[in-house]
Amino acid sequence: MEKQLNEKNNENKNKKNKIFKLHKHEFKEIEKRLNKKLESYITIFKNIICEKITQMGLSFIFFYSLLHLLKFYNVGKDIYSVYICILLYLFIILCILILPDEYPKI
């Protein structure tokens, strides 16, 4: 009777070990896939951020130099603020028209 119980216990342990080994192998494959996806997301994120930072920096430099040129020619803030507001609203309208409403899922 004890031998039979011991054999059943050993069989159960062997089955569990086989199942665990299979799951361990599957987990490694899933981990590899997740790492690949994570790396692709990181590279996409880096590219987008670098492009946006560059564009923002150039636009800040442009507007800074433009404002100093206007100050040099004694153009008052009351005059050029209207034009800057118009440029801002045109930029917002262009963004609404050009940028997509939905982004593709990767």
Image (cartoon, helix red, strand yellow):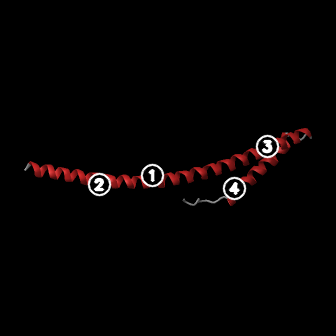
**Dot placed on the residue nearer the N-terminal end, 2 or 3:** 2
**Residue appearing at x 79%, y 43% in the figure:** 61
Find the residue positioned furthest to the right.
73
Amino acid carrying mark 2 in the image: Lys
Q: Which of marks 2 and 4 precedes in the sequence?
A: 2
User: CB of mark 2 within 8 Å of CB of mark 3?
Assistant: no
Q: CA distance from mark 2 to mark 3?
A: 64 Å
Q: Amino acid at mark 1?
A: Glu
Q: CA distance from mark 4 to mark 2?
A: 57 Å
Q: Secondary structure at mark 1?
A: helix
Cα distance in 3D space between marks 2 and 1? 20 Å
Give the image location of residue 40, x and y in percent. Answer: 56, 54
| Element type at mark 4 | helix
Residue on which disc 3 sits: 61
Question: Which residue bears the numbered disc 2?
Answer: 18
**What amino acid type is highlighted by mark number 3?**
Ile
Which residue occupies 67% across, 57% down?
96
Looking at numbered disc 4 in the image, what kind of residue is underneath it?
Cys
Mark 4 → mark 1, Cα distance in angstroms: 39 Å
Q: CA distance from mark 3 to mark 1?
A: 44 Å
Q: What is the quadrant of the C terminus in the image?
A: bottom right
Instruction: Tell whether 34 sits left or right of 47.
Output: left
Q: Which residue is mark 4?
A: 95
Crowding at dot 1, Cα within 10 Å, few <14 / some 14-19 / many 20+, comes out as few
Name the one closer to the observer, 61 or 75. 61
Q: How far is disc 3 from disc 4 in space, using C-alphas? A: 20 Å
